[in-house]
Amino acid sequence: MGSKYPPSVRGCLPLWALTLEAALILVFFFFTYYDTSLEDQKVLMAFYQVCQDLTVMAALGLGFLTSSLRRHGWSSVAFNLFILALGVQWAILLDGFLSQFPPGKLVIKLSSIRLATMSAMSVLISAGAVLGKVNLVQLVVMVLVELTAFVTMRMVSRNVFSTYMHNAMLAGGVAVGASCHLISSPWLAMVLGLVAGLISIGGAKCLPVCFNRVLGIHDSCGVHYTFGLPGLLGEITYIALMMHQAVWANAFAPKSQNMERTSCG
């Protein structure tokens, strides 16, 4: 990325990346194959469009997010693409091996690539908070460690706790990510987006001073107020809408039952 890194880091990164990629190629050669079954063309195109949009947002959107930094301006998109490619490969293997029992050959579909891209975006977001404090080799290690923890927690959340509230923490429209299927009126989505935007703008003005000077927390790209606080707002909104829906259903269920009984009588 930057030319001021010591020669040990600049020499170690290509060797480490080539060794890791060679190991991944061997694993994919022996344990994976493409899905060659005939699928519905509409379903296939729907998955392809989602994968296309996610890839553009991850490769270009999050890549240009760090281009304003002086030492990362010329190579932010390139190294962001490298982290994305490495993360997608590692996430596909983790998703396959953790969800398939007994372990065998993994089937690679567009749905698995889409899920792996969403997992890799968590690393791209969190990497923006540590730029300037870690070198490139440490970022590659961070991809492997964080994706392992992320995919494992998603499997535990899906199989044990049966909750999908973590969807609000991914990226982009994090404030409406978890509660979009519960929003019944446009004005509610507009209010939620306005509050999330105000939180993000206010955080850009206030939180850097608080984090850097008072708490001593490093955040190069504003991950806390761009994704963290809107994501927290999204989860709170999800819980509030679920509680409102449950109360509304309990309030009108006895009335509907009484009306059915009187009509039958």
Image (cartoon, rainbow, N blue to C red):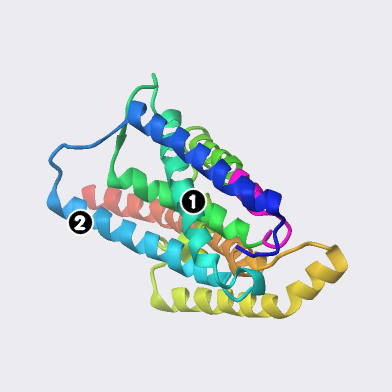
Front residue of this view, candidates 250 and 202: 202
Q: Position of residue 153 (x, y in %)?
A: 55, 39
Q: Is residue 46 left or right of residue 238?
A: left
The three-letter amino acid code for the residue at tag 2 is Met
Residue located beneath label 2 in the image: 45
Which residue occupies 30% across, 54% down?
A: 259
Left or right placement of residue 90 versus residue 233 in this view: left
For label 1, the crowd category at 10 Å Cα-Cα, with few meaning under 14, some 14 to 19 and many 20 or more, is many
Q: Which residues are magenta?
A: 130-142
Q: In front here: 158 or 11?
A: 11
- Quadrant where the N terminus sits is bottom right
Secondary structure found at label 1: helix
In x, y percent, where is residue 79? 53, 59
Relative image position of residue 121 (x, y in whole percent)? 50, 55
Q: Answer with the quarter of the image where residue 149 lies.
A: top right
Q: Quadrant of residue 228?
A: bottom right
Q: Which residue is mark 1?
A: 120
- For label 2, the crowd category at 10 Å Cα-Cα, with few meaning under 14, some 14 to 19 and many 20 or more, is few
Dot 2 lies on which element? helix
Number of residue marks: 2
Q: In the displayed orientation, state which residue is furthest to the top.
A: 102
In percent of the image, x 75 and y 77: which residue is there? 206
Rendered residue at 38%/60% (across/down): 55
Examine the rendering and report whether any part of residue 217 can be seen: yes
- The quadrant holding residue 217 is bottom right
Give the numbered dot on residue 180. none
Q: Is residue 176 magenta?
A: no
